[in-house]
Amino acid sequence: MTGTIPPTARLRAEDLTLSYDQRTVATDLGVVIPDHSFTVIVGPNACGKSTLLKALARMLRPKAGEVYLDGAAISSYRSREVARRLGLLPQSSTAPGGITVGDLVARGRYPHQRMLKQWSAEDESAVAEAMRQTGVLELADRPVDDLSGGQRQRVWLSMVLAQQTSILLLDEPTTFLDIAHQVEVLNLCADLHERKGHTIVAVLHDLNQACRYATHLVVMRAGGTVAAEGDPATVMTAELIEDVFGLPCRIIDDPETGTPLMVPTARKRPAMAGDVLADSP
């Protein structure tokens, strides 16, 4: 392979220019994903969060710059080799009609298959373990179409886990889920990070969820640049939020976790008939 350089992290990007057709999303974009971190990428709409994730997964070829995986340019690997090293959960996933949970999760073993290699006991074990980790083993024979949104999201995550990669890229894994299922999926990701040592990179919209779960936070601004990155406790400030999102706020401690909690500044409610004035007798 070409492009070998001394690795400072298993996954990083340098000087990326990212675009769709003639529309440039980001220029000179660089990011380093700390090994064994739960990295969360946040930022305003259309700032390039998902685009960056696609580039990290080699789903989008940069116009300039390079993504490096395990010390080599990711473009130098064959597709199957990339899929053995990192797994991607796209933002929108559609299962074939009528497919069962077990069959869908089994598709995660594709990178390990060969033309002459039959389904093995190792494959069977990997699929069962992936479903066990996500709590969907008892759903193996159920059609995916019959599941709730939270259950489906855990099944898709199972398929990625069946690849048996230690780097997981998750593009807005809580989209379209109610708050209970959002917490369920994020708790599962946190368990995979803490107990299994996975390096997780997730794009999230909710800043408070990002601060609660991330060990490393990347804040992007409009135009596809990194405004700040690091420990959420030091990165997340009221000044940064107003600068990046245009939202005045206060930052307080989350009463459950002690992590930063963003509270938007309340608008002043107009005086209503019957309100008692502060200086009234």
Image (tube, grey):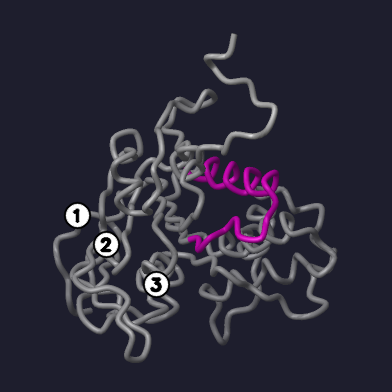
Between residues 43 and 60, which one lies in front from this camera angle? Answer: 43
Residue 196 lies left or right of residue 40; in this view the side is right
Q: Secondary structure at mark 3?
A: helix
Q: Which amino acid type is marked by label 3?
A: Thr
Residue 12's disc number:
2
Of the two numbered discs 2 and 1 in the rendering, the one whose residue sits closer to the viewer: 2
Task: Name the residue tied to disc 3.
Answer: 51
Among the two numbered marks 3 and 2 on one chain, the one whose residue lies closer to the N terminus: 2
Farthest residue to the bottom: give it. 21
Q: Residue 209, percent across and down?
A: 51, 43
* Number of disc labels: 3
Q: Residue 2, percent across and down?
A: 18, 79
Between residues 78 and 66, which one lies in front from this camera angle? Answer: 66
* Quadrant housing residue 118: bottom right
Q: Which amino acid type is marked by label 1?
A: Thr
Task: Name the residue tied to disc 1.
Answer: 8
Farthest residue to the top: give it. 281
Which residues are drawn in magenta? 170-193
- Whether tag 3 and tag 2 are in contact, CB under 8 A, the answer is no
